[in-house]
Amino acid sequence: ASGFFSSVSGGFRNTASGGSASVSGGYDNEASGGYSSVSGGSLNTANGSASSISGGGQHTASGTHASVSGGLRNLASYNYASVSGGLDNIASGNQSSVSGGRDNTASANQSSVSGGNDNRALGRYASVSGGKANKAGNLNYPNNASFGASASVSGGLNNVAWGEGSSVSGGQLH
């Protein structure tokens, strides 16, 4: 523990270098952001200010107040972004969230993916509830608030809701 008021409570090869940062256990974990914390797991990095990782492995919480709760290889990279669990999920928009599943991305502000596999929430306030390979938001203008805002896909396979306020309940795009 090298940061002002930082602490390492246990584990192996853990580092708390941010001011008031803490690592509670596990191994090869790093809390380098000010007020950041890693509770356990392995190979986790909380380098955003006030970011946190609860457990699991190979996570990064790099946004301010970003959090990753568990799973494997998840990334919360923008302010207040969160990934609750799953595998290889990314929450990269401001206040975006991915609840679980695999290979899901919520990249626009206030966007969300609840689960499933390979789903993308690309428009502001866009959401994908589940399924596989679904996209909510305009594919040609990802992360642009004017295109695909508030679009939603409830589930299914290969569905795209890209118009503002558009929705797809399920099924399959052919």
Image: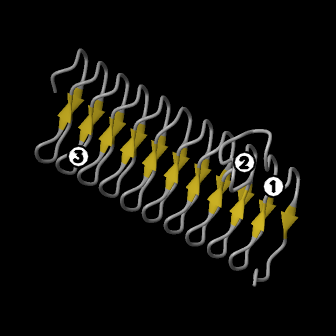
- Amino acid, disc 3: Gly
- Residue position marked by numbered label 2 in the rendering: 123
Q: Quadrant of residue 33?
A: top left
Which of the numbered marks, if any, corresponds to residue 44?
Answer: none
Mark 2 → mark 1, Cα distance in angstroms: 7 Å
- Residue position marked by numbered label 1 in the rendering: 151
Circles 2 and 1: CB atoms closer than 8 Å? yes
Mark 2 → mark 3, Cα distance in angstroms: 38 Å
Q: Residue at x 17, y 42 (%)?
A: 10
Instruction: Specify few, some or many for label 1: CA neighbours under 10 Å numbering under 14, 14-19, or 20 or more.
Output: many
Q: Residue at x 30, y 57 (%)?
A: 57
Q: Earlier in the sequence, mark 2 or mark 1?
A: 2
Which is in the foreground here, disc 1 or disc 3? 1
Q: Residue at x 69, y 79 (%)?
A: 157
The answer to whether 139 appears left or right of 102 in the picture is right
Instruction: Specify few, some or many for label 2: CA neighbours under 10 Å numbering under 14, 14-19, or 20 or more.
Output: many
Circles 1 and 3: CB atoms closer than 8 Å? no
Q: Position of residue 169 (x, y in %)?
A: 84, 72
